[in-house]
């Protein structure tokens, strides 16, 4: 007897290879910007090891221990994400001497449940900040949001995250103080 497919199951979206591209940082080194893959988990652990406490605080709004950031369950959710709900792009470089892959930065677009909006965020390894990676990843995440027919993207950041505020303004976001004045919100209608 044949097995009929469950009509409630939706097919798994294939790897979105159209978002894979080479890009050159301000220092002349090339990186591959691409959607994250399940096999990136060990490389993501190494990425989180490169982050200073300040970078972590500016991204997550609190001290988030390395142990918790690299927990298997957490990284599995990120690396094995649902491309229909969330798109995570990484900037990856292969070390020319060792051949080791390194993730230098990560950008994320997460669709929100309410309306046709998405939240975006970026995190760059301390060693690779000020090389244009944050701007480029955020720009590409916005393009993904446009492709996904998102009408508005938003980002929330701490008031002292000046770099992110500058990047969002350069990309055309409106920036305003949050309700409690403990955060800054940036919005871009697409």
Image: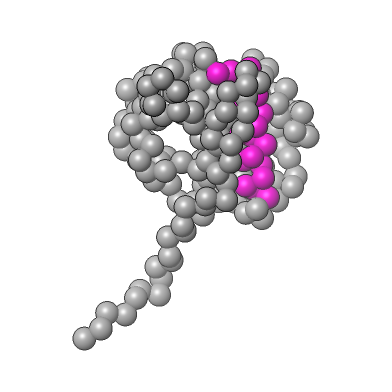
Residue 111: image location, x then y, percent: 56, 48
Q: Residue furthest front?
A: 97
Q: Is residue 132 magenta?
A: yes
Residue 35, visible in the rendered structure: yes
- Please say if 36 is above or below 8: above
Instruction: Please report the residue visible at 47 percent of the width from the left and 52 percent of the height from the top.
Output: 15
Q: Is residue 155 visible?
A: no
Can you say which quadrant of the picture contains the N terminus?
bottom left
Magenta part of the protein: which range? 128-146
Reply above or below: 180 against 40: above
Q: Report if residue 92 lies within the magenta region.
A: no
Residue visible at 68% across and 17% down in the picture: 162
In x, y percent, where is residue 143? 67, 45
Which of the two residues, 138 or 34, is positioned nearer the viewer here? Answer: 34
Left or right: where 7 falls relative to 154: left
Secondary structure mainly formed by the magenta segment = helix
Q: Position of residue 90 (x, y in %)?
A: 51, 35
Question: What x and y, as percent, mark residue 108?
Answer: 54, 38
User: Picture quarter containing residue 50?
Assistant: top left
């Amino acid at each position: 007897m044949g097995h009929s497919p469950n009509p409630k199951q939706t097919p798994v979206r294939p790897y979105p290879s159209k978002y894979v591209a080479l890009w050159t940082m301000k220092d002349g080194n090339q990186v591959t910007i691409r959607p994250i893959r399940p096999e990136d988990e060990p490389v993501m652990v190494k990425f989180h090891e490169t982050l200073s406490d300040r970078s972590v605080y500016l991204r997550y709004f609190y001290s988030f221990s390395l142990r918790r950031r690299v927990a298997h369950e957490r990284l599995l959710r990120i690396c094995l994400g649902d491309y229909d709900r969330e798109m995570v792009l990484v900037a990856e470089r292969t070390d020319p001497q060792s051949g080791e892959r390194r993730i230098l930065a990560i950008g994320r677009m997460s669709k929100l449940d309410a309306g046709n909006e998405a939240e975006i965020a970026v995190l760059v390894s301390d060693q690779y900040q000020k090389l244009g990676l944050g701007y480029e990843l955020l720009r590409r995440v916005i393009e993904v949001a446009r492709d996904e027919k998102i009408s508005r993207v938003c980002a929330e950041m701490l008031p002292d995250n000046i770099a992110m505020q500058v990047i969002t303004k350069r990309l055309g976001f409106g920036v305003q103080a949050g309700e409690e004045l403990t955060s800054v919100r940036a919005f871009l209608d697409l």
